[in-house]
Structure formats: C-alpha cells, structure tokens
Amino acid sequence: MSDYQRIQTASHWGVYNVGVKDGHISDVSPFPNDPAPIRMMESLPQMVRSPLRIDQPYVRASYLTRKHDSRAMRGCDAFVPVCWDEALDLVEEGLRRIKTEYGNESIYGGSYGWASAGRLHHSPSVLKRFLGQFGGYVDKAGNHSFGAAMHIAPYVLGSSDVTSIVVPWREIAEHTELVVMFGGANSKNMQIDPGGAVMHETDGLLGAIAKRQVRFINISPSRDDTPSQIDGQWLPIIPNTDTVLMLGLAYVLVHEGRHDQQFVDKYCEGFAPFRAYLLGESDSVPKNQYWASKICGVSTEAITSLAREMATKRTVITTAWSVQRADHGEQPVWMTIVLACLLGQINKRGGGFSLGPGGVSGIGIERPGNVPRPTLSLGRNPIDISVPVGRVADMLLNPGMELNYNGSTLRMPDIKLIYSAGGNPFHHNANLNRFVDAWRRPDLVVVHEPWWSPPAKYADIVLPATTSMERNDILATEFQRHWIAMCQVIPPVAQSRNDFDIFAELADRLGFGESYTEGRDEFGWLEHMYKGARQKAMDVGYEPPPFEDFWDLGMYEFPLSVTNRENSLLSDYCNDPKKYPLKTRSGKIEIFSQAIAEYKYQDCPPHPCWLEPVEWRNSPIARKYPIHLLTNQPAGKLHSQLDPSDLSVSFKRKGKEVLSISPTDARARDINTGDIIKVFNDRGEFLACAKVTDNILDGVASIPTGAWFDPADPTTTGTIDKHGNPNVVTLDIGTSQLAQGSVAQTALVQVERFDGDLPVTAFQLPRISHRS
Ligand SMILES: Nc1nc2c(c(=O)[nH]1)N[C@H]1C(S)=C(S)[C@@H](COP(=O)(O)OP(=O)(O)OC[C@H]3O[C@@H](n4cnc5c(=O)[nH]c(N)nc54)[C@H](O)[C@@H]3O)O[C@H]1N2
Ligand SMILES: Nc1nc2c(c(=O)[nH]1)N[C@H]1C(S)=C(S)[C@@H](COP(=O)(O)OP(=O)(O)OC[C@H]3O[C@@H](n4cnc5c(=O)[nH]c(N)nc54)[C@H](O)[C@@H]3O)O[C@H]1N2
Ligand SMILES: [Mo]
C-alpha cells in the first residue's frame, strides 16, 4: 500500500501543493485559486534534496586551528564537518569573546536578504530577535530595491511607503488613455512578491488593459521592458538620463502653457525656483526639448509630441525602481512626481503617477485596507546604528569613517563579527572584488544557509538551515489579501535545523533562552502570532476563523469590500488638503524642499535637477569603457535563489548568463550569438554568453543578475568570474548623500570576444577535509 498526501506550502513565487508518496516528493501542482501560476514553483521541490544541500554543520578548516588569523582564507579554504554541539560551541565562544572585547556595536546583524516566505521562520527576523536580546547589533538602513525613492519621497510626499503610491492596474484598465513608462514594467518581475505571491493577477489585468487599447510607451534602453500582453511603443533612451527627458517634457508643458497652474498653486510648494531652473532663468540653460534630446537620445519631435499628448490625454506616468537604482537616483523619482503635478491629474481617476508598478506581482493590485499580518516580535535593538545597505563594504573597510546620510553624520562602526542568515551578499553587493576584501576583515563570519551558495562558501562557521518545505509557517504579505497555511512537506533534510531553533539553542546557552522562545514551540508561536493578527483584523471588521479552522482550511481570504484601499495618501490630500495635509514641511507636495536645501548637498539639490552620473555615455571613461551595462532581475529565479535549478539553468547558455548586445556593437567586436564574451572594467571582469538582438539600444548591454559568484581563483581577489555575476563590475557608491542608495544601473564596461572557455564551478561542493 503506498501512502500519498498532497500538502500545501508557499514561496515568494506562489502557493502550491506538493504530492508526497512514501515520503518522497512525487509531483507539484499550483494553488487552484491562482489565475496564473508560474513555473518557478517547481524549482524548490527540485532543489530541496539537491546534492548542494548542506548536510551538517561545517567549520572552515584553518579557522579551527588559527581562528581569525586565518580570515584571509575565507572563500578558498576547505571545510571540516563537525557535530552541532561543536559548531554551536564555536559560535557561542565567538559571540561571547567579541561582545566582551569590543561590545555589541562590533556585531553586524543587518543581514540583508529575501530569505524565504513565512512570518515565523523569516531568517533575518529571527536573527534580529536573537541579536537584540544578546545586547544589540548594527543594523541595515534602506533597501537595494528602491532605496533612493524611499528616502526622497518623505521630503516630497511626506511618506516613505512608495509601494502604496500607485495607480491600480484596474483603474488604468478603466480610465487611463496613456501610460508613459520610464523603465517599462517587465512581466518577468511580476512573478514574485516579498513574502509570497498568492494570486498572480497582473496577467489578467494587463490582458484587460490590452483589450481597451490603452496606449503604452516603454521608455527604456530595452524593448523587452514592455509588459508581454501590451503592444506598446518603444522609445529607446540612453541609460540614466530619464530625468533629462522628464525635464524636456516639463519644459514643453510650461513653455507652451499646457501645464495645470491651478493644480500647482493649490497642491504644490516651491514651483517658482524650479520653474526658473526649467526655463533656464537661473542657470542660462533652458531644459527644452533640444537640450534634452542631445543628452537622452530621444528626438526633439518625439519629446514635443509626447508632452502635448500627455497634456490632452488621461495619463499615468510610471517609473520603475531600476531607474532610481543609479547615480543620483533621487532625481528621476522627484521629477516623476513634479511632471505628474504639472499635468494636474493626480486627483483624477486613471491619472497621476506610480513608482514601481509591476516591480513585484502585488503592486497595483486592489487590496483591502488595514490587513494586519501575523508577526514575530523583533524586540528592541539596544544599538542605535544603521548603515545603508549599499555601504557595507565602506563600513567593513573604514571603521570610524564619517558618512553624510540623510541630514546627519554616521560614524562607521568597527565590525568584528558578521552574522548572516537569509541573504546573499555576493549577489546583492556591488563591486564584489572590493567587497571580498571587506568581508575578509572581521574576526568571525557565521552563516546559516540551506545550500552551498557563495555566502556559505565564504563563511567561517556554516550552520545548515531548513527550507520552507521542511517547517510549518504562515504566509501573510502586505501585497496580498490572503493568509495561507504553509505546511511542512518533508522532515528536515539531513541535519538541517530551522533558523528559529538554532537561535533558540544559542539563546539558551547564552542565558536568555526563556525570553527568546517565551516558552513556545513552532505551533505555539504560529497560534500566538495568528491570534494577535486575528484580533486586529476583527477590530476593523474582518472575520478570520480561529487558528485551528484556519489551519484546516489552509487559507483566509480578506474580502475586498470592507475597506477598499485606493491611492489613499494622495486622494485624501487632494480631496481636502486642509484636513489631510501631507507630512512634508509645508504640508504640500514639495517641488522645492527647504529641508533638503539646509543639508547643502551638492549631489542632491533642493529641487529636481539633471546631475550627470559618474559613469555614463558622455563620461571621459567612456572612451575606454563605451558600453553601459544594465543588470536586471532574472526571469527564471529570484535573485540568486534556486540558481542551480533546471528552470534557472535553462535561461543560461553554455552554463553562463546571457548578455544582450546590439547588432552594431556586436559587429564592431566580431561577436555572434552564442559566443563566450568577456565583460570588464577597472573593477573586475566576468564571462557571459552573447545574444545579439536589436531589442537593445546601441551602446548598452544587459544581463540578468543572480549567477552564483564564481571567481576563477578565489585565493586572490579580482580574478575573472566564470559564470556571469555582473556585480564584479558594478559600482559601490551611494546615489547621493541623501539616500546613499545602490547604483547598480550605473556602470560602464568594455565587451570583447573570449576565445576558449573557463567552465563554471559555482555549483560544486567546497573542498571537504575530514579530521584524522
Ligand atoms: N547588479 C545588480 N545587483 C543587484 C540588483 C540589481 O538590480 N543589479 N538588485 C538588488 C536587489 S533590488 C535586491 S532585493 C538584492 C537581493 O539580494 P538577496 O535578497 O541577498 O538575494 P537572494 O538570492 O534572494 O538571497 C537569499 C539567500 O537566502 C537563502 N535562504 C533562503 N531561505 C532561507 C532560510 O530559510 N534560511 C536561511 N538561513 N537562508 C535562506 C538563499 O539560499 C539565498 O542564498 O539584490 C540586489 N543586487
Ligand atoms: N523573476 C524575478 N522577478 C523579480 C526579482 C527577481 O529576482 N526575479 N526581483 C524582485 C526585486 S527584489 C525587485 S527590487 C524588483 C525590481 O524591479 P525593477 O527595478 O523594475 O526591475 P529590473 O529588472 O532591475 O529593471 C527593469 C528594467 O529597467 C531598465 N532600466 C535599467 N536602467 C534604466 C535607466 O536608466 N532608464 C530606463 N528608462 N530604464 C532602465 C532595464 O532595461 C530593466 O530591464 O523586481 C522583483 N521581481
Ligand atoms: Mo529588490
């Protein structure tokens, strides 16, 4: 008799059922309610028993004998298998010593990363709960996704919640005539949601939009950024010059008197100094269509006619997060808002602006309001230091350095211990060769990972973590209207343990086990978290069932009818600006910010401006490195997660990531589709496989991120990456002193054909050495 069960679990890329027969995964099927399930759901069931799973704790060989004197060996050493007790002894000893000698401000627990879905077993959260109770840790500030937007928006709109300030797709389907997309809205990105996509609804909504023949203009260096359902117009633009095009459009509107002066007078602060800049009264440079065209590469006719069309049609302006992930990334965000104000449609249905629609699945989807989430309390962090996520290498390399950041000065702490769980620093950080040097500075690096991914290989002590399929949890995210029961599908693989339980044992050893667990086990916590959220939900009129019923049913769907959320921040303000002033200094939308003026930042002036990026087509260094490299999100995986899965590998060629390059640029370099190529600048070099396509602008190349870091010779820094990890060439400066955001999309490179091949070894196990 065979025993078969179907068990529901979930991931960032969807809810799915796993068939388990005689203890083995036999099949995977999508969540029946999901209108457009995606293939990525097959990848985790496939990877869960991969030979790359870390089967037990390991310690870097020379750490065992020489401790931190051997830190330069991080990433190139063998690993010694040890039992859990010995591994935890070493972690405990390291934590105690470093706390005693250097204090908690020497512990970095910022651990950026998407980890996996689920509210209890979210590894960066359990890490923070643990380190907070241990006396505190240095945290991260901002994010890689929309770091510039979330820092500039409070000054302009009085809120950092940029993901909520969008015109819903349904409203676009019903009311909008024209969508002007800076950076497009690439369908591949709508597969996932942070914490879990449940309903992939954008597909259907974009289908409805396509039927109504709303006009879409994709302003991007890449034609592929038009959503797949939409037959849009491609208006190619030179990377990092979106602000220029927006200024050119604004100029035409103002110069021709087509802007909405009444809207500006009523709702905006500080138009006069911006107008003087726009018209060239303050610097003798009118930002007209002729000026703009020369810089951004869009013709003067196209700029003029687009501005006129925008003024006559119900228009939504959208700006992808990628556009602000660039030097001076605050400016295109600010300028998007100003341009929408000039059109005066923010208070009209189907008009206005969106920051990052389509960045993930749930953005722009109607959601009920006030949906609470079951959460694990992080507790207090007694150390009040947070370092911007893109400045981690600066922190590790330059303790004591002073960094101007958002109106204050941050003194970089002296980090002795990095504790990382749920992120891949060798994916999310830029300028990886410099980052590897930085990572080799602290005394101790502890990593929890399910797989032998780059962070595991670059650790001193590696503790094997379970995946979401090996534990019980609850999916609840801000972008979806469901709570989903995530049920354990299989027992923990090999000796892996839940991150939560690893920290519970460490807390016990360190004397605060009771306060860390509060006496609860996994189901105790799930029930506790659920009950707290259920009470909040009932207080505002929802009726989620008691925990046992929820778990049996497997889900609760919040009805849309209770309090449907519209673009509430701006609609409330526009309906009644006196009653609902914005939380900006003036209470209005700020075209000029006195607060920013007081900072006197050259790289972030008090109104939106064109500031040249450090690297772009017209920089002096473009003579040596003439290709602007764009590094977008991968279609077949989430960042670096599941990179070895069949789906992810199917997007590679010759085992390497695929770089798109224009026919003109390819011809000049004698490159054909399928050739192995070398991409390089002064920061580093990587191999990729070429795809020659006229979907990309001349002078631009594009490669998806996520290839596991694979340096040819890890014993030194700076050797060629064999796999196509573009972060060996990206730049690790901040967008400006204001946001200090990441600038991944600002990088110039040269591309040439590479004769021969260096096979990828990123998916091999590290060297394992056994003690005699
Ligand atoms: N060049 C360039 N670089 C970029 C970007 C770009 O546009 N260009 N984009 C940036 C952006 S927006 C982001 S958000 C970042 C993303 O960067 P990250 O979020 O760091 O990337 P992930 O690959 O999702 O890393 C998650 C890691 O957690 C591990 N993991 C998964 N589940 C668990 C678990 O339960 N427990 C533990 N302990 N570990 C787990 C996975 O194996 C994986 O190694 O990358 C950034 N990097
Ligand atoms: N499948 C999948 N989906 C994902 C992710 C993933 O890893 N895999 N990651 C998720 C995460 S964490 C995030 S933050 C979002 C990111 O969402 P986005 O930032 O919107 O996504 P990207 O793919 O980085 O960039 C979108 C496009 O912007 C264009 N672009 C780049 N630079 C410029 C520029 O200067 N000007 C203009 N006009 N266009 C430019 C590029 O052609 C690129 O294809 O995606 C999310 N979605
Ligand atoms: Mo992101």
Image (cartoon, grey):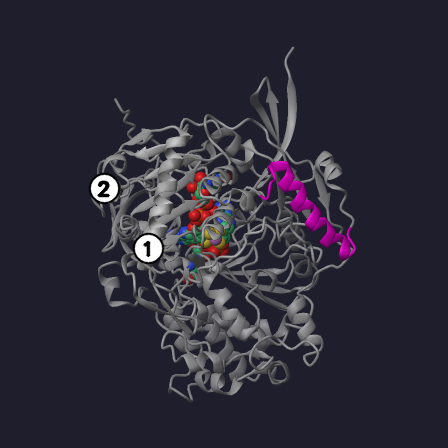
Q: Residue furthest bottom?
A: 281
Q: Residue furthest top?
A: 1
Q: Are marks 1 and 2 in contact (CB under 8 Å)?
A: no
- Which residue carries the number 1 mark? 102
The residue that appears at 55% across and 41% down in the rendered structure is 121
Q: Quadrant of residue 641?
A: top left
- Which residue carries the number 2 mark? 70
Look at the image and say whether residue 173 sits in the magenta stretch.
no
The residue that appears at 40% across and 44% down in the rendered structure is 706
Pick the residue in front: 511 or 704.
511
Where does residue 7 sit, x and y in percent of width and height?
Answer: 64, 29
Q: Secondary structure at mark 2?
A: helix
Q: Amino acid at mark 1?
A: Tyr
**Disc with the residue nearer the chain's start (1 vs 2):** 2
| Region of the chain picked out in magenta, as a range | 518-542
Q: Secondary structure at mark 1?
A: helix
Where does residue 345 sit, x and y in percent of width and height?
Answer: 64, 73
Look at the image and say whether residue 519 sits in the magenta stretch.
yes
- How crowded is the residue under tag 2: few (<14 C-alpha within 10 Å), some, or many (20+)? some
Callout count? 2
Pick the residue in front: 624 or 602.
602
Determine the main secondary structure of the stretch shown in magenta.
Answer: helix
Q: CA distance from mark 1 to mark 2?
A: 19 Å
Direction from residue 484 to residue 766 in the image, left or right = left
Tell me if I can see residue 661 in this picture. no
Q: Where the N terminus falls, by quadrant? A: top right
Q: Where the C terminus falls, by quadrant? A: top left
Q: Amino acid at mark 2?
A: Ser
Pick the residue in front: 191 or 20.
20
Where does residue 325 sit, x and y in percent of width and height?
Answer: 43, 60
In this view, 103 is above or below 150: above
In this view, 711 is above or below 682: above
